[in-house]
Image (tube, coloured by chain):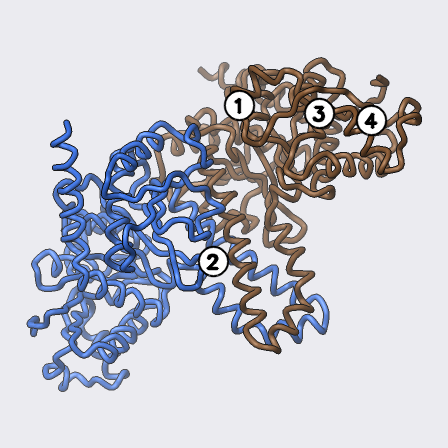
Chain colours: A brown, B blue
């Protein structure tokens, strides 16, 4: 196995609803775009070699291929597997091995489109939290009214409940993501709440607001409501995993509803039908970007390694976007920067105690 | 004051962003549609008489008008007023008096487009909970993929946190609403969660699931995710007020985002621009129904009286829809039915203890 590249990413090629052809196609797209990228394809060897052959990379040439390595695994984490099953009984799964490679330093990041719950549990078990980080979080970027800007939101479902200090840390980690991945100076951090006024919300949200506003390194701008997630008022929106998961999935539900209702509107009359068929392509594109999870995946941050979760239903372009997200996080050394920020905040707070 | 009608509703005409002209216009529309309806207009007397005159109901004819009564009040709860200010210092406000009239039995329901937080606090203080109901809830109906069906969702923001028994009671109250207001037999009740599997979510959600499934009068169908709110899988979706508020406002945010992005898509080329301008009206209508809160208001249920909250930004049609919602709840005796269901459940559970 040639693991001498500076930029090595382990792919769980078996994960996802659409099978390894999609993930391997994305891998080929990625190495073509980035000549210094090395990908380790974790999964069933015969399936992978067959697909590679179909994609014009025959088996006998693979040994010479500097950008691709197969890491044969014998198990697959199914979409229906409970996390505990994946953890205990699937130690040779493509997902587990991809994470092991990151833990062992043989890869710098892992990308999977597999079972989210299993990936969160395995990643947490294999990679462990960065020192000082209480809980890892699932973060993704969503579109805003400004076409050139998006907004990071976390946690999107890694944790059911988060106390005030965990929310504060999400603010710190989100700030690092926006700064490093998007190059935003002093990213605007907001807490998602049921109103903008100070008196609104639960005690732990009010306490998180105090903690965030007292950290001089965080540009905390206050509470934000659901209707303003996409308003470009904030660069990072912080909430617990339950609320974030419901909000993100509600977006998906609304996008689907609008799409279905607009199809009906378009077919209401012959004229509308004609117009609709002409506008349909740009509309499809629009609704695709409205589903950010499907578009560019979500990252699990706060761990000692980079893990990007692509949507289970991702096509090759979406899986490619997830690989590119992982590359960005490797290049910007996101875990190291999060470690430094959490440590700095910790020593800062300690000195004022 | 003639309060001899069988169907009397008190309106807080001063509440809302758009002023009393909107609310009074809606009142006139309502009495024209329903000859047996009597409305009590609570608010500034001179403003109301002036507006009525502009709407062709002159002051000297008002005494003969069997469908309209003015109830003069000297104060207005502002949108910026904290609930405690409304409660302590605005005892002669239009909002407070409209609720007092319900409490005194002079009206059977109250409709307001005013400050939500103040309305929730005042309504709770003036009307009190139905015996056995732990917390009132804000409920509204949202559109689904099926044009002929909508889904009720509660709580939308009356309570920040709800324990398992409160969530269970929301299920019972939501079931009564769907049965009485929509005439659905055995409405399908679901709990909003971050996954459909039994192991997902917080302890209080899992406990609420147990309590709902053990109640033989409730058709509990399990957990539902944010993406399925609009799928017509459930007739009633139960969640705590924080999550419900974020989900509802996120819908509003997504609808606004899609509208803005689709406008851009429509103006991308001259052809698209032309098509867009022709399709715009049906699209505007679509996005209006996508914002259910603005469309037909939300009801505060679990109190000893009917309170319907119209959106602050409601126009006359939306405020009319809120009045009509109140009429429906009066006719179907929703509070009495909730009382019976909560008592029945209570005695049922007590007998098995």
Q: Quick check: can you spot residue A1?
A: yes
Compared with B247, A16 (above or below) is above
Q: Nearer the viewer, mark 4 or mark 1?
A: 1
Q: Residues within 10 Å of mark 1 (few under 14, many from 20)?
A: some
Spatial CA distance of label 3 from label 2 is: 40 Å
Q: Tell me the CA gap for discs 4 and 3.
A: 11 Å
Q: Give neighbour class at mark 4: few <14, some 14-19, many 20+ (Cα, 10 Å).
A: many
Disc number for residue A83: 1
Q: Residue A109 carries which label?
A: 3
- Picture quarter containing residue B41? bottom left
Image height check: is B116 above or below A322? below
User: Which residue occupies 43% across, 59% down?
Assistant: B291
Chain letter of the residue carrying label 3: A
Pointer 4 or 1: first along the chain: 4
- Quadrant that contains the C terminus of chain B: top left
For marks 1 and 3, the one nearer the N-term is 1
Residues B72 and B186: in front is B186
Name the residue that disc number 2 marks: B145
Report whether mark 4 lies on the same chain as mark 2. no
Q: Residue B99's spot in the image, x, y percent? A: 16, 57
Across and down, in percent, residue B334 comes to: 19, 56
Q: Is mark 3 on a helix, strand or loop?
A: strand
Mark 2 secondary-structure assignment: loop
- 4 and 1 marks on the same chain: yes
């Amino acid at each position: 196995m040639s693991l001498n590249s500076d930029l090595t990413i382990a792919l769980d090629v078996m994960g996802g609803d659409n099978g390894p052809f999609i993930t391997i196609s994305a891998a080929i797209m990625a190495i073509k775009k980035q000549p210094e990228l090395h990908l380790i394809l974790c999964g069933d060897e015969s399936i992978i070699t067959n697909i590679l052959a179909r994609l014009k990379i025959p088996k006998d040439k693979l040994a010479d291929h500097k950008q691709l390595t197969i890491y044969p695994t014998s198990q697959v984490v199914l979409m229906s597997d409970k996390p505990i099953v994946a953890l205990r009984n699937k130690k040779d799964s493509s997902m587990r091995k991809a994470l092991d490679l990151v833990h062992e330093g043989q890869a710098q990041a892992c990308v999977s489109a597999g079972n989210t719950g299993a990936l969160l549990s395995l990643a947490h078990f294999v990679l462990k939290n960065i020192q000082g980080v209480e809980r890892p979080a699932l973060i993704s970027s969503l579109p805003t009214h400004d076409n050139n800007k998006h907004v990071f939101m976390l946690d999107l479902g890694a944790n059911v409940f988060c106390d005030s200090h965990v929310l504060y840390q999400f603010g710190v980690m989100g700030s690092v993501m926006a700064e490093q991945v998007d190059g935003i100076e002093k990213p605007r951090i907001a807490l998602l709440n049921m109103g903008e006024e100070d008196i609104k919300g639960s005690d732990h949200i009010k306490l998180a607001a105090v903690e965030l506003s007292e950290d001089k390194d965080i540009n905390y701008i206050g509470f934000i409501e659901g209707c303003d997630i996409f308003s470009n008022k904030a660069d990072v929106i912080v909430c617990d995993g339950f609320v974030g998961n419901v909000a993100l999935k509600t977006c998906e539900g609304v996008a689907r509803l609008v799409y279905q209702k607009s199809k009906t509107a378009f077919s209401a009359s012959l004229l509308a039908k004609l117009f609709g068929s002409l506008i349909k392509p740009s509309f499809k594109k629009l609704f695709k970007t409205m589903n950010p999870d499907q578009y560019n995946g979500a990252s699990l941050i706060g761990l000692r390694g980079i893990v990007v979760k692509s949507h289970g239903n991702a096509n090759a372009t979406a899986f490619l976007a997830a690989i590119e997200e992982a590359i960005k996080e490797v290049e910007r050394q996101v875990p190291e920067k999060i470690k430094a920020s959490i440590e700095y905040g910790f020593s800062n707070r300690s000195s004022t105690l």
